[in-house]
Image (cartoon, grey):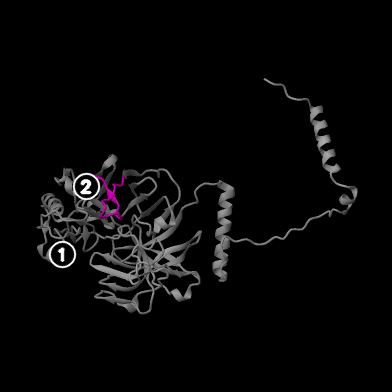
Amino acid sequence: MASSPSPSIHLLSLFTLFSLLFSAYSSEEIENTPLTITLPLTPKFAREPSTDPVVFLQQLASASKSRAHLLKYGKTSPPPLKTPLYPMEYGGHTIPLSFGTPPQKLSYLVDTGSTVVWTPCTTHYQCINCTISAKDVPFFEPQLSTSLTNLSCKNPICNTGCLRCKANSKNCPQVCTFYLQYGTGAEAGYYLLEDLHFPEKTIRDFIVGCTTIGLRETYIDGMAGFGRSMYSLPVQMRVKKFAYCLNSHYFDNTRNSSRLIFDYRDGDTIGLSYTPFLKNPPDSPDYYYLNVKNLMLGNKILPIPSKYLAPGSNAAGGLIIDSGFSYGYMAGPVHKIVTNELKKQMSKYRRLYASEEEYGLGPCYNFTGRKIEIPDLIYHFAGGATMVVPGNRYFKFDTEPTGIGCFPVDTDDANNLEFTPGPSIILGNYMQVNHYIEYDLKNNRFGFRQQNC
């Protein structure tokens, strides 16, 4: 090992260096050198600051929080964003979102079964064959925002292209349009690039749909698509996972809100059971498919053929989880297997055929004056995760907590035994109540635990 040089040699070297440095300047140059140097100090913003005082203060607050987080934690993931989640009388759950400059806050239905965020945005909004009146629909006002731009049909992220211009046209003025189908309803309009504001963060140039016409809609809120697409809310926010805990079975607007969490952190959440998302069939790229192994009703394994539990390459079969679907859905053959077993286990209660005809649900029973004993509905997923839905959480009661109760899961035709396209089972939000639900996008998995929401 080589020895270290002595301190005297270090001092001699430093003296020689300073001598050479000062000898390069004449005494006159040293005398004329100013004792202070003044440099201009100019404010610098990542983006042109807003002229609106409120938005400008929000921008400063957001920048300050980001700086403080960086100094405190270094280059770690930012803290989660939390927003209120409200149960609605039509069976959905909404969050408030603020688009534009200045921000315009409106309610948006949380829908993991679709992918686009949209809102009506004109006083001339039309709703054809709807159960709501178009004049009652809240709408975004584009003309009031200074941060809005239309998404051009020439933009590579426009998936519909320029429908009214020639293929080789370089200066097509057309905006990027869309048409979205939702079961029996639909929306049409065009895309905007707009700022989305949260108290802690602003997402620039967010792709949001501006709808001008609706068909057979049943609610007045906008839509926040959370599905597996570049247009969805969590993907545009670049979160690693999102989670919610639903707290109402009463289908009203009076219950307290819970929380929806946008999480930029990686890793396990304490107490959750996880199961991987399945690879999507080519014809259904936007859904969250779960790998369900079997279903049980009480202690009875239901003899559901495997083709209904796993999606085929033609997108037929399989189970998806959908926060925008209230009661859920089972294809005719699956519904028949489940309800046949349910009738056996519920035979001690009086069946209400008239109520089944009236509600279009079933089977229905009269629980008046009786102890309610409904078997658990149990989903066994790959990886050992098990979701237990207690009977009083998947039955719909006419009067809480006793009275008429029905099995509310929808079906196309229980007598149709054909294997039809699309998911065979949809796990709706009704069965998700009082579960903490997590969609881990980074690790491509679904997590949950029972929890009082």
Q: Position of residue 64 (x, y in %)?
A: 58, 57
* On screen, residue 338 above or below 169: above
Q: Position of residue 42 (x, y in %)?
A: 67, 62
- Magenta highlight on residue 275: no
- Secondary element under disc 1, as helix, strand or loop, is loop
Contact between marks 1 and 2 (CB within 8 A): the answer is: no
Q: Position of residue 369 (x, y in %)?
A: 17, 58
| Residue numbers of the magenta segment | 276-294
Q: Residue furthest top?
A: 1
Dot 1 amino acid type: Gly
Residue found 49% across the figure and 69% down from its top = 147
Q: Is residue 233 left or right of residue 179?
A: right
Residue found 70% across the figure and 60% down from its top = 41
Count of numbered circles in the view: 2
Dot 2 amino acid type: Ala
Which of the two residues, 289 or 315, is positioned nearer the viewer here?
315
Q: Position of residue 450 (x, y in %)?
A: 32, 48
Q: Is residue 283 left or right of residue 259?
A: left
Q: Which residue is mark 1?
A: 360
Q: Quadrant of the C terminus?
A: bottom left
Q: Which residue is mark 2?
A: 310
The numbered mark, 1 or 2, whose residue comes first in the sequence reads: 2
Which of the two residues, 263 or 289, is positioned nearer the viewer here?
289
Which of the two residues, 445 or 220, is positioned nearer the viewer here?
445
